[in-house]
Image: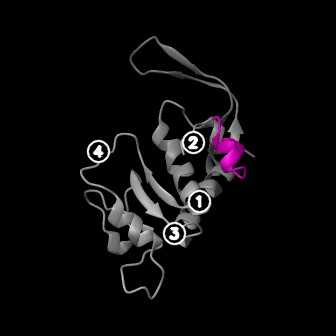
Amino acid sequence: QLVTHSTIWKELPDLPAAFDSLPKHVPTMLADVAGPGLIAKYGGIFMHSDVLLSGNLTLMENVLRAEPNSGGDVADFIGHAEKGQDCQQGEIGSVFFAGRPGNIFAQEWYETATKVLRNSCQVRPTTTTTPGSNSTALHSGPRYVPQDFCKN
C-alpha cells in the first residue's frame, strides 16, 4: 500500500506534531520515522524509492511468513548493512528492511524516533545570513529543534 505524507496520520495516529515540520524536500527524514512505524504495525517490506531490486523478494517473504519450528529460516526483522555498518552490532541501513507485524526491532526504532520528535520544542521563525554574501533566508512556519537547544 502506498502511504503518503497526507495519509500517514491515518496509519500512524501517534506521530508527534513535530513530524509535520520535518522538511518535505528531504523525504528520507520522513521515511526514517514512518518506515519503522509502518513495519512495526503492519509488517511487510519497506524500501526507499531509489532502491533497485536485482532479484525477487520470495525468499525474504517466505522467511518472514515462516512459523517457528517449521524447519526453515525464520526472522522477525530483516535488514541490510550499508558500507561501514556491521549487522552483528545492530547497525543497519534504513533504505531497505522488512519485518513481521509487532517485531521488537522496528517497534523500538519507531519509539526512539518519535521520542526524539516529542522531546523537541517549537521555535519562532528565524533568519539566516550566509557568511560572505548579502543574502538572508527567512525560515518560516513552526520549526522543531532538540530540547537541548530550547531556551527555558
Residue type highlighted by circle 3: Phe
Of the numbered discs 3 and 4, the one sitting upstream in the chain is 4
Of the numbered discs 3 and 2, the one sitting upstream in the chain is 2
Question: Mark 3 and mark 4: span between their CA atoms?
Answer: 24 Å
Q: Secondary structure at mark 4?
A: loop
Residue 116's image quarter? bottom right
The residue carrying mark 2 is 3
At x 47% / y 84%, what residue is drawn? 68
Q: Which one is in front in this view, the residue at disc 3 or the one at disc 2?
A: 2
At x 67% / y 51%, what residue is drawn? 12
Q: Which mark is residue 52?
A: 4
Question: Mark 1 and mark 2: span between their CA atoms?
Answer: 12 Å
- Rendered position, 59 above or below 130: below
Residue 74 in picture, x, y percent from top left = 41, 78
Of the numbered discs 1 and 3, the one sitting upstream in the chain is 1
Q: Residues within 10 Å of mark 4 (few under 14, many from 20)?
A: few
Q: Residues within 10 Å of mark 3 (few under 14, many from 20)?
A: some
The residue carrying mark 1 is 42
Q: Residues at badges 4 and 2 in contact (C-beta under 8 Å)?
A: no
The residue carrying mark 3 is 105
Q: Which residues are magenta?
A: 6-18
Of the numbered discs 4 and 1, the one sitting upstream in the chain is 1
- Rendered position, 29 above or below 39: above
Residue type highlighted by circle 4: Leu
Q: Secondary structure at mark 1?
A: helix
Residue 88 in picture, x, y percent from top left = 33, 75
Q: Which mark is residue 103?
A: none
Q: Secondary structure at mark 3?
A: helix
Residue type highlighted by circle 2: Val
Q: Secondary structure at mark 2?
A: loop
Q: Is residue 7 magenta?
A: yes
